[in-house]
Image (cartoon, helix red, strand yellow):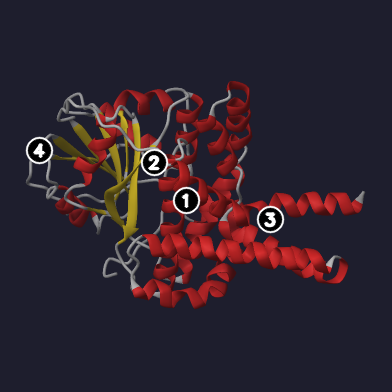
Amino acid sequence: MMNTLWVIFQVIIGYNLVLPFILFVFYQLFKKPVASAAVRVDFDYAIIVTAYEQTALLPSVVNSLLQLNYSSYLIYVVADNCDISHLHFADPRVILLRPENVLASNTRSHLYAIANFRREHEIVTIIDSDNLTDPEYINELNVLFYAGFEAVQGVRAAKNLNTTYACLDAARDIYYHFYDGEVLFGLGSSATLAGSGMAFKTDLYKACFENLDITGAGFDKVLQAQILRMDKRIAFAKDAIVYDEKTSNADQLVNQRSRWINTWFKYFGFGFDILLKGIKKANFNQFLFGIILLRPPLFIFILLSVLCGLVNIFIFPFYSLMWVLAFGIFVLSFVLSLKIHPTDPRIYRSLVNIPKFIYFQLLSLLHAKGANKRSVATKHNVNS
């Protein structure tokens, strides 16, 4: 019985190492092209920028948004619990909002902006206060909205590669954007949401949160689950790029990852619900997405895999060889994600520091339970 349980446990952990490569192979063989509609319209966008306590980066993100190669949009800056006395935006397309009461919640800030729309916008796109946008960002999102999708995730590329931590953070994002974005969507499932650089039909976004009040990190996990439960797909726009501030020091990393790990433990159960819906309805979109939601954070299944491999040296040496093979497949998958897209040489050089990166994520795991009390938002260095 113990041997059987040990084998089952290893399978549950080990399939995470080989799943990306399996998905990649099927993606190469069966990826589905996106058909765009013949008739194109200029959707009216509401760009919602949320800030909590920190305003130093807001002028940069607003200036970036004003350079978009698009005309039909307004920018709503929600400065929650912020001193806005020094903020002045002359452009009439920028609406600065400061809630009277502290919201301390992404979704509350988004819904506050929606409640204060100057006009009815067909689409909302979510941008973080530390982001910058590519000038073609909205035009690239529109390609998917023209095709009939109601939810689209773009790419969060690295804005800064000034430290080893930032480079490793960027490598992680490249890996997830490829497998959880491009590959999943290309196979006919949905891209996972990344917290910013994403856009939705306004009615869909409001419907997802009309009966929910989400606090703490993880609103994107709730949002993607709500969309999948409605039997809709989240599209992936690989050329809709926002530049995201990567964690540049150990304190940032620990605080941010603590919140993310807390979020996974809090919401991973959505995966069972969506997976079962997919099985009952024979819905491939829900089935595959449910499997992805059940996957633990990268560093957790890597460390558990190492543990399994080491234990097997003493009890089932042959299984250790299988773990070595599985690790080799995972490394190949990771390298493929970096090779397929242009990757800065600094990111490759940073990979030797992965053990240090994992160590700090272990510290994050220890702080995960009280993560939202430690910090509500990542504090960034303006000069980075």
Residue type at mark 2 is Asn
For mark 3, does the 10 Å Cα neighbourhood hold few (<14), some (14 to 19), or many (20 or more) residues? many
Mark 4 and mark 2: span between their CA atoms? 26 Å
Residue picked out by circle 1: 179
Along the viewing direction, whichever of 133 and 107 lies nearer the viewer? 133
For mark 2, does the 10 Å Cα neighbourhood hold few (<14), some (14 to 19), or many (20 or more) residues? many
Residue type at mark 1 is Tyr
Task: Give the number of callouts.
Answer: 4
Q: Is residue 376 visible?
A: no
The kind of secondary structure element at disc 2 is helix
Please tell me whether mark 2 or mark 3 is closer to you in this view. 3
The spot of residue 142 in percent (x, y) is 23, 36
Along the viewing direction, whichever of 128 and 273 lies nearer the viewer? 273
Residue type at mark 3 is Gly
Disc number placed over residue 14 in the picture, else none: 3
Residue picked out by circle 2: 106
The spot of residue 218 in percent (x, y) is 48, 43
Sequence order check, earlier mark of 2 and 3: 3
Residue drawn at (14%, 30%), measured in percent from left and top?
42
Mark 3 and mark 4: span between their CA atoms? 49 Å
Residue picked out by circle 4: 71
The image quarter containing residue 60 is: bottom left
The kind of secondary structure element at disc 4 is loop
The image quarter containing residue 192 is: top left
Q: Residue furthest front?
A: 29
